[in-house]
Amino acid sequence: MPRRVGGEASRFVESVWFARGRIAGVRELIAPTGSTVAAVVLGDPIRQTPVGEGTALVADEGFLIGPHDRPIVNEPQGETFCVGIVTTPVGCRPALGLAPATLRGRVVDLLQAWPRAHGLRRELMTCRTPAEALDVVEAALGTPEPFDRHAFARCEVAVRQLSAEPTRPVVDIATGLGVSHGHLDRLFIEHVGLSPRTLARILRMRRLLEEIDVYGSVEWADKAAELGWFDQAHLIRDFKRHTGVTPAQYLATQRSTYDHADAAVSAGFVPEAR
């Protein structure tokens, strides 16, 4: 059950969510979105493993996924029962008070990284409904942590422009903001945890995954041209790095796991069959 937050927090938090049940497979790959994710575990432990050189974490009480450009392997050890926060690409510091660069490519214990999660988890344990749990999380995010509002606003504008045009030259965005390319890179590392070009690649792939109809006929060459890949082969290489599977494997897995309606809201998820 996802929910968009309101007010000023909507600039920092993309969504909050409640999840209870069992995933479609024994584990699943989840593609990066450019966000930081905080999840409070209320039931069975959940194992999270960054693809590549990251260290796995078996979370008993909560986990924090930093900004990353490779998939995360989600492997519940039983029934999933947790409540989560998904920040905007620039929202890690104001929402959680944490420097995103220190979390890049990592999964860490939530309660150790974000001390406020101790009290939040205790309160969530008393909630009787998903809506009540989401109300608690949204209330906890109502007052932002201290952050540099001027630098945040610059990064926020840049992220918006990259979302609209992922292939737009970063130097053009920097010039429009009145800063150098190097200065914008440094702002992004501090406030996003990723470089502008890395985030642009993530946002472009996220847009592709959200646009394709896995039950329809996908013209990959047309999509490559439309979204600025050099050719279909370039798209396929990026696709596999981003999701962990080829486009053909992704379509087959989505079709075998989800019906048409569920597939529309499961973009970027690649379950492994039981």
Image (cartoon, rainbow, N blue to C red):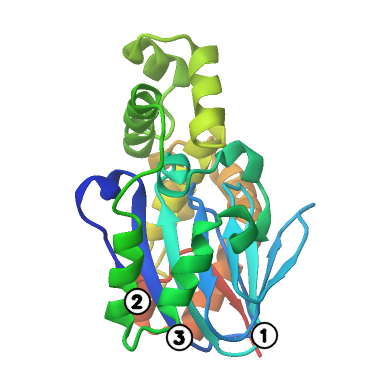
CA gap between label 3 and label 2 equals 12 Å
Q: Which numbered mark, 3 or 2, is in the foreground of this view?
A: 2
Tag 1's secondary structure? loop
* First in sequence: mark 3 vs mark 1: 3
Mark closer to the chain start, 3 or 2? 3
Left or right, 174 with reference to 46: left
Disc assigned to residue 20: 3
Foreground: disc 2 or disc 1: 2
SS category of the residue bearing label 2: helix
Image height of 228 relative to 170, above or below: below
Q: Residue 77: in sight, yes or no?
A: yes
Q: Amino acid at mark 3?
A: Arg
Task: Tell me if label 3 and label 2 are in contact, CB under 8 Å.
Answer: no
**Callout 2 amino acid:** Ala
Q: Residue at x 35, y 60 (%)?
A: 140
Q: Quadrant of residue 86?
A: bottom left
Determine whether 56 is above or below 198 in the image.
below
Which label sits on residue 133? 2
> Which residue position holds label 1?
77
- Give the alpha-carbon distance from disc 2 to disc 1, as whole Å: 22 Å
What x and y, as percent, mark residue 196? Answer: 50, 29
Instruction: Please rate how many residues cluster around mark 1, counting C-alpha atoms within 10 Å: few if below 14, some from 14 to 19, many from 20.
Output: some
